[in-house]
Image (cartoon, grey):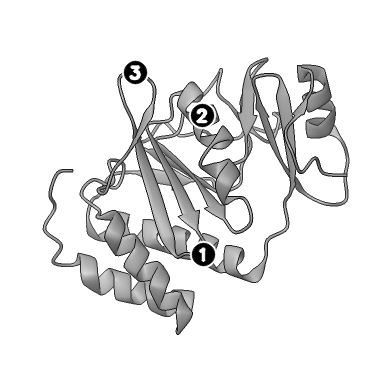
């Protein structure tokens, strides 16, 4: 059964969950000797927004920059003996992104690969935890930018890591350099009356003449 609240657990207990052959996919989080196990299946709204974010990444990087990027939504990140997480949004900028090789574990080993440039959680029923425990977890891993997408409120909380290893909320993305967070929220709001593909098309028209500004 999933652990819907953080529970004291050893790293070996986490590994038992990670390596277990289960019929249902789960999302694992391990931080400060505590374990959280969430169901991996997605509701309609969560799934629609997850796909929308992937489309927005494609549109942004195809229109605004020729920079190489790669996304790994839902993939497990692991720092051995320390922390793990399975964020809904994982974005690497540049050519040095993780590449799986036959025979390797099917997760991103942060002792081998660098940390992502951006991670995020799509929060349908987990908003409080995503803005608290998971936020602290990602800060401890040194993730430069963290998004929390509020499914119910159609809001995006974006945070940038500071020199003191704490997140500060920002209104312009660093990873998608110059993207106003308000534009993400306006795109989400369109899901009230239209499909995620239509919302993505609207986003594409908005950024064509976007003036890139600093935060």
Spatial CA distance of label 2 from label 1 is 24 Å
In the rendered image, the vertical position of residue 42 relative to residue 71, given as above or below: below
Closer-to-camera residue (60/42): 42
Q: Is residue 205 visible?
A: yes
Image quarter (top left, top right, bottom left or bottom right) of the N terminus: top right
Residue at 34% over, 75% down: 201
Disc with the residue nearer the chain's start (2 vs 1): 1
The residue tagged with tag 2: helix, strand or loop? helix
Residue that sits furthest to the bottom in the current view? 193
Q: Nearer the viewer, mark 3 or mark 1?
A: 3
Q: Report if the CB atoms under discs 2 and 1 are less than 8 Å apart.
A: no
In the rendered image, the vertical position of residue 137 relative to residue 129, given as above or below: above
Image quarter (top left, top right, bottom left or bottom right) of the C terminus: top left
How dense is the environment of label 2, judged by Cα within 10 Å: few (below 14), some, or many (20 and up)?
some
Please tell me the numbered disc located at residue 164.
Answer: 3
Give coordinates of residue 76: x percent, y percent.
Answer: 64, 37
The residue tagged with tag 1: helix, strand or loop? helix
Spatial CA distance of label 3 from label 1 is 32 Å
Disc with the residue nearer the chain's start (3 vs 1): 1
How dense is the environment of label 1, judged by Cα within 10 Å: few (below 14), some, or many (20 and up)?
many
Residue at 44% over, 65% down: 154
Residue at 53% over, 60% down: 50
Give coordinates of residue 207: x percent, y percent.
Answer: 22, 65
Disc with the residue nearer the chain's start (3 vs 2): 2
Q: Report if the CB atoms under discs 3 and 2 are less than 8 Å apart.
A: no
Identify the residue position indicated by label 1 in the image.
49
In the image, 68: left or right of 124?
Answer: left
Identify the residue position indicated by label 2 in the image.
136
């Amino acid at each position: 059964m999933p652990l819907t609240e953080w529970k004291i657990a050893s790293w070996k207990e986490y590994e038992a969950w990670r390596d277990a052959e289960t019929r249902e996919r789960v999302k694992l989080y391990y931080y400060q000797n505590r374990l959280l196990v969430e169901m991996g299946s997605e509701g309609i709204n969560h799934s629609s927004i997850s796909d929308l974010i992937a489309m927005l990444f494609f549109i942004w990087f195809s229109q605004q920059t020729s920079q190489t990027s790669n996304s790994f939504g839902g993939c497990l990140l692991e720092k051995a003996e320390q922390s793990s997480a399975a964020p809904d949004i994982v974005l690497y900028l540049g050519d040095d992104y993780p590449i799986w090789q036959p025979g390797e574990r099917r997760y991103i080993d942060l002792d081998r690969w660098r940390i992502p440039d951006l991670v995020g959680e799509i929060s349908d029923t987990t908003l409080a935890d995503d803005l608290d425990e998971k936020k602290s977890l990602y800060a401890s891993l040194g993730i430069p930018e963290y998004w929390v997408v509020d499914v119910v409120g159609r809001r995006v909380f974006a945070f940038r890591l500071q020199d003191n290893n704490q997140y500060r909320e920002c209104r312009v993305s660093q990873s998608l350099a110059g993207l106003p967070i308000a534009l993400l929220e306006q795109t989400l709001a369109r899901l009230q009356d239209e499909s995620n593909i239509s919302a993505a098309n609207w986003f594409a028209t908005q950024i064509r003449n976007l003036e890139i500004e600093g935060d």
